[in-house]
Amino acid sequence: MSANLSIKPPKNTLNIAQIHLSEGNRKKLNQLLEEFTYSEALRKYNLPIDNKILLHGATGCGKTATANAIAKHLGKDIIILNLGNFVSSRLGETAKNITEIFRKAYLERAVLFIDEFDFIGKERDYDEKDSGEMKRLVNALIQQIDNLKEEVLLICATNHIQVIDSALLRRFQLKLSYEMPTQEQLDVYYDDLLSAFPENLTQFDRKYGISYAEAKDFVYQEIKTKVIELEKQKKQLLFSYGTLQLERVQLETYGRKLVGKADILRGYQIQDLKITDEEVIKKSGKDTHPIAVKTNNENDTIEGVIFEITNEELIQTDLYEVDDYQRVLETFESGEKAWIYTKK
C-alpha cells in the first residue's frame, strides 16, 4: 500500500454529534446521512443518492474530523488519500493508481476521503514534461467521479476551493464551507474540551481568532503544563542522615530551610565516602560524606531526620548526591515511608 494511502476502521474517532458544525452544515450533513440510511427506500423511486461531498475552508476547522465521523456513523471503513503527496511521489502512474483506489473503495463499500484536493488546481502551471500526465490525472478523476457507484461515498477536502477547476467543482452535489469559529463557537468548544478535566486544571485565559484544531492544541498544552506543575509540587518524604541536614546545603539546594522530624532506620549502618566532586564539596564544606549501607541486621540503626519536600526538590536532591548513591524507598521506625540515599 502506498505510504500516502491509509485504510482504517471508524474507531477511536468523534461522533457526528461531537463535531462542531454550523447550523447549515449540520442540516446538509444530516440529510446526506439519512439518504445513505434509507437508500433502499429511495431507490424504489429511482431517486439518486448524493454521494459526492466537497469540504472546503479554513484549515483546522474540522474537515478531516467530519470525514472520519461520517465513516463512523455509516459503519464503513475510510480510505484516506493525500492527493498532494500521492501525485508528487507517483506522478508517472497517477491516473492508473487513482482508478485502482476508486475500485478498492467500491469493492470495500468504503468512504473514500481525498485530502488536498486543490493540488490539481495548484498544478495547472506544471512543467511541460509532466503536463500530459497531469491532464491524464484530471481526466481520470473526472471519469471516476462521474462513474462513482452509490455504494461509495466520496469526500474531498480543500483549503483553496478557488483554484479548483469548475469542471471538477460542479460534480459535487454537496459542498460544506468551514469558516474560522466565532468567539461564541470557540467558547462552546472550550467548554466541551474542559468538561473532561477537574476545575483546578481548567482555569486559564482562552484564546480566540484561532481554529478548532489550534484551540485543542492550546487547551492540552495549558492543562499539561498545570499537571506537570502540580506533580512538581506533590509532597515527598526524604530521610537525611548527613549533609542535607546542614542549613547552607538546604539553602543552596532548595532555596529554603527544611523542617523535619527525627526518625530511625533499622538494618543499615553508616560508612564514610570520599567525595571528589568540587561542587558538592563547596556546598557541604566537607570532602567526606556519610553513606548508608544495608546490612539487614535489625540491631544496626541510623538516626536522622525526615523532611517533607516537593517532587521538584527531590530531583534537585538527585543532582546534589554523587553517583555512589542510589535513592530507595524504605519504612522507618515511626512507620513512615521515605526516600533514603544508600550505597549502590
Image: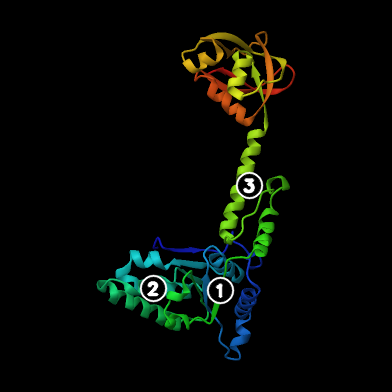
Residue extending furthest toward the bottom? 45
Q: Position of residue 225 (x, y in %)?
A: 60, 43
For the question of whether residue 135 can be seen, the reply is yes
Residue located 28% across and 77% down the image: 132
Q: Position of residue 75 (x, y in %)?
A: 59, 69
Answer few, some or many: residues within 10 Å of disc 3's Cα (few below 14, many 20 plus, some between 14 and 19): some
Which residue is pictured at 52% across the width and 70% down the height?
A: 57
Labelled disc at residue 177: 1
Quarter of the rendering containing residue 40: bottom right
Label 2 packing within 10 angstroms: few (<14), some (14-19), many (20+): many
Asked whether the beta carbons under mark 1 and mark 2 sit within 8 Å of each other, the answer is no
Picture quadrant where residue 164 is located: bottom left
The N terminus: image quadrant: bottom left
Q: Nearer the viewer, residue 221 or 33?
A: 221
- Picture residue at 59% right of the left edge, 71% below the top: 74
Which residue carries the number 2 mark?
120
Can you give x and y, in whole percent of width and height, for residue 219 in the image? 62, 52
Q: Label 3 to label 2, Cα distance in Å? A: 40 Å
Q: Residues within 10 Å of mark 1 (few under 14, many from 20)?
A: some
